[in-house]
């Protein structure tokens, strides 16, 4: 992710971002729980595990928060996640040849549980329940939720409004980028972010043997 990011900690910017993101994620989680309850959405044992979907993340703020998680979990688990991320990102290179997007499990998922749950990115928190958001120009986009729920509820009821969450994240991102003078466009899967983090943490090559968690 480069020197811009590395100077963030020195400037005390990341601490503020972590506080703001934690608070925002808390709001998202509360709203999500309310809607998941309404729709009786139970992800346990889901046949269409959303951790295998190709989600992209676009903000440095989410990156910083996820990095915080990677720093806090036990070393052996962190190293195993990095090792798995290498395999996942390595597989992307074969997709064009195969002419399909592979369904690859996120490297942070262990037997259905997210090892970075508290620090997971926004879309991991909001995916699933029917929702909408209003774009800055006023156009509204709706989604019936994840495939399993959309199949169950052909006519979705109340929709979760993602607009305030997107706006709040954009505001945090704007302040962060201005503070750092960071202009790089980001579009990363969780696996790609984890490999960027391995460079930040300087843990290249420190891999534990498979199963050493
Ligand atoms: S970060 Fe966690 S919740 Fe998000 S896709 Fe990976 S394992 Fe799933």
Image (cartoon, rainbow, N blue to C red):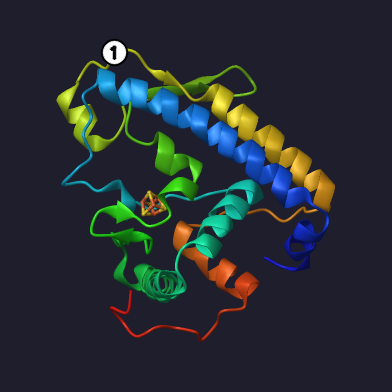
Q: Nearer the viewer, residue 187 or 98?
A: 187
| Residue drawn 62% across the image and 78% down it | 202
Q: Nearer the viewer, residue 17 or 87?
A: 17
| Residue drawn 58% across the image and 33% down it | 23
SS label for mark 1: loop
Q: Which residue is mark 1?
A: 157
Q: Quadrant of the N terminus?
A: bottom right
| Residue 41 appears in view | yes
| Residue drawn 46% across the image and 63% down it | 73
In this rendering, the answer to whether 130 lies above or below 54 is above
In this rendering, the answer to whether 61 lies above or below 155 is below
Percent coordinates x, y for residue 16 in the rendering: 72, 43
Percent coordinates x, y for residue 85 in the rendering: 42, 70
Quadrant of res 156: top left
| Residue drawn 57% across the image and 54% down it | 187
Quadrant of res 100: bottom left
Percent coordinates x, y for residue 75 in the rendering: 47, 73
| Residue 101 appears in view | no
């Amino acid at each position: 992710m480069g020197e811009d990011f590395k100077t963030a900690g020195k400037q005390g910017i990341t601490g503020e971002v972590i506080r703001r993101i934690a608070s925002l994620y808390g709001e998202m989680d509360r709203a999500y729980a309310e809607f998941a309850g309404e729709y009786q959405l139970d992800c346990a044992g889901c046949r269409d595990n959303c951790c295998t979907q190709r989600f992209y993340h676009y903000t440095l703020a989410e990156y910083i928060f996820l990095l915080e998680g990677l720093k806090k979990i036990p070393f052996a688990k962190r190293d195993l996640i990095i090792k798995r991320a290498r395999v996942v990102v390595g597989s992307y290179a074969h997709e064009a040849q195969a002419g399909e997007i592979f369904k690859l499990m996120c490297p942070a998922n262990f037997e259905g549980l997210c090892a970075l749950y508290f620090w997971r990115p926004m879309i991991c928190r909001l995916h699933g329940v029917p929702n909408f958001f209003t774009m800055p120009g006023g156009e509204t986009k709706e989604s019936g939720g994840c495939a399993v729920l959309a199949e169950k509820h052909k006519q979705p009821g109340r929709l979760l409004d993602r607009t305030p969450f997107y706006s709040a994240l954009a505001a945090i991102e704007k302040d962060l980028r201005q503070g750092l003078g960071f202009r790089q466009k980001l579009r990363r899967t969780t696996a790609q972010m984890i490999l960027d983090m391995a460079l930040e943490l300087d843990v290249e090559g420190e891999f534990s043997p498979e199963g050493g968690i």
